[in-house]
Every structure is written in C-alpha cells, then in structure tokens.
Amino acid sequence: VSMGRGEKLLVVFWWCYFAVYICCVHVVFLADELSRFFFYLLPFHLFGMAMGLVMFAILFRDLYRRSFPDRLSKVLWAIVMVLCWPMIFVYLYRHGFRPR
C-alpha cells in the first residue's frame, strides 16, 4: 500500500502552492511593499503553514509504514527530511509515490 490518491494530491498541491507563494512574496519584497501587503499575505502564509504541517505528517507516516532494507535507512531519511526539507523531493521521487 502506497500513499493514497488524496495524499499524493495534497503533497503535489502544497509544492505548487509553495512555489507560487514564494514568487508572490519575492515580488512584494522587491517592490519594498511588505508593510502594506503584510495583512493580505498573512492568511495565505498561515494556510500554507497548516498545509505544510499536514504534508510533513503524511510523509513521516509514509516513512514509518515503508519497509527499508535496514533500520538505519529509515532513521537517516527522517533526519535528512527534518534538517534539509528540500530533500523531500528526493524522498518523494525515490520512495513516496511508489508502492511499498
């Protein structure tokens, strides 16, 4: 059993949302208008944070349920995902979207 269709959709949606959000915030920073747009961006920021926490929970649940050749691999993946979160792309490519 791998991640469900809804879980995969949520993870992909979060990454797309994150990419668009980063671009919007970058434009606001370049325009030096953060103080003016802060309250407009805050709900989107909180929504993205909540979705990110759900995504991390889904990924760690998948990591916990997945069998690896040795226990050290699972612990190493958990440490890498916490310390260097962009490595989640690698985890999703190598393990996350594949059957367990």
Image (cartoon, rainbow, N blue to C red):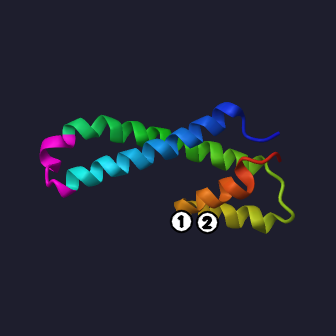
Region of the chain picked out in magenta, as a range: 30-38
Q: Residue 56's x, y, as percent?
A: 57, 47
Residue at 51% across / 46% down in the picture? 15
Residue under the image location 72 percent in, 47 percent down? 97
Q: Which mark is residue 43?
A: none
Q: Tell which of 82 and 41 is nearer to you.
A: 41
- Percent x, y of residue 43: 31, 35
| Relative image position of residue 83 (x, y in whole percent) | 54, 65
Q: Is residue 44 left or right of residue 5?
A: left
Label disc, if present, on residue 80 of the rendered structure: 2
- Three-letter code, disc 2: Val
Residue at (83%, 39%) from the top-left corner?
1
**Measured Cα–Cα span from mark 1 to mark 2:** 6 Å
Residue at the right extreme, as displayed: 69
How many numbered discs sit on the rendered protein? 2
Q: Please state which amino acid type lies under the numbered disc 1.
A: Cys
Q: Secondary structure at mark 1?
A: loop
